[in-house]
Image: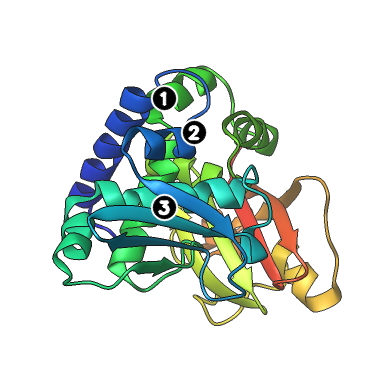
Amino acid sequence: MLSKGKKKHLSELAEFVANEYCPEGVVQPESIAKSKGIQYSYGEYADDFDGMLEHSNGQFHIFINTDRLEHAYKPRARFTFAHELGHYFIDEHRNALQSGQAPAHSSFTNFASENVVEREADFFAACLLLPEERLRKDCFRRKFSFRLADEMAHKYQTSITATLLRFITIDLYPLMVVCSQDNKVKWQWNTQDFPYYNLKYKKEKVPEDTAAGEYFAEGIKYSETEIVFAADWFQVRDKQFDRQFYEHCVYSDARKTVISVLWED
């Protein structure tokens, strides 16, 4: 995980870049690249990478892989472009490329990389596309629901995963997001004020009595938000056994993945 200090620095850096180059409306990574003289291209590169930042002959170039990301206007392509901009705007990343100390940044943008450089660029990308000041203004005095997160994802042209994780990093609401794949927990993010942290089976298995667990056990997919209990997801004390939470799932059959967002009323 990134330290609080690093997250604060990256968030402030991304906020500055967004306000400097796209002060109003939706942040456009291509416009930022043009303003900085960064060349870019969209091409078919099989499964080699999602995006890549290359430095050659004094020039930076961003490559976006349409084989994996489809069209340029899709949220994943926009996020990948923003991720590569992160490698440019984060001084250590850019300097390493310019000096030849690091090869071209070949990236897979999925919030799950073990490489700290990739985690930093992922975090920067979410902050850039979902500027804190604008997001706080849009959510001011509004109660959390999955519909709100979905509305913000459409407004900022970002994936629901990136939007939910941005909600968490700026601590808009007490939330937890759990990513499960093949019936195992891949990663979890939560705000500091979310009441639980320890999952029932840790990362070994998705709890059976959750909406995500039912997908892996029986292939059941819920289109609406479901009610679950604290003991379904978490290690809890007896008196907290029946504390109610909401769970809303986003499914990917192709990847055998479920994103679960958890919150209280």
Left or right, 46 with respect to 100, comes to right
Where residue 97 sits, quadrant-wise, is bottom left
Q: Is residue 62 visible?
A: yes
Q: Nearer the viewer, residue 79 or 241?
A: 79
Percent coordinates x, y for residue 144 in the rendering: 59, 32
Identity, as a three-letter code, of the amino acid under mark 3: His
Disc 1 residue crowd, few under 14, some 14–19, many 20+, Cα 10 Å: some
Query: Cβ–Cβ below 8 Å for labels 1 and 2?
Result: yes
Question: Which quadrant of the structure image shows residue 201?
Answer: bottom right
Q: What's the mark number on residue 28?
A: 2
Quadrant where the image shows the N terminus: bottom left
Q: Secondary structure at mark 3?
A: helix
Instruction: Measure the C-alpha gap from mark 3 to mark 1.
Output: 16 Å
SS class of the residue under badge 1? loop
* Few, some or many residues within 10 Å of mark 3 (<14, 14–19, 20+): many
Cα separation between marks 1 and 2:
7 Å
Give the Cα separation between the discs numbered 2 and 3: 13 Å
Q: Residue at x 37, y 74 (%)?
A: 114
Q: Residue at 22% of width from left, 55% of height from top? A: 58
Residue 22's tag is: 1
Mark 2 and mark 3 residues within 8 Å of each other at the beta carbon? no
Q: Is residue 170 visible?
A: no
Q: Which mark is first along the chain, 2 or 1? A: 1
Name the residue: 72% across, 73% down. Answer: 256
Name the residue nearer the viewer: 265 or 52.
Answer: 52
- The kind of residue tagged 2 is Gln
- State the residue at coordinates (37%, 30%): 18
Are discs 3 and 1 less than 8 Å apart at CB?
Answer: no
Q: Which mark is residue 83?
A: 3
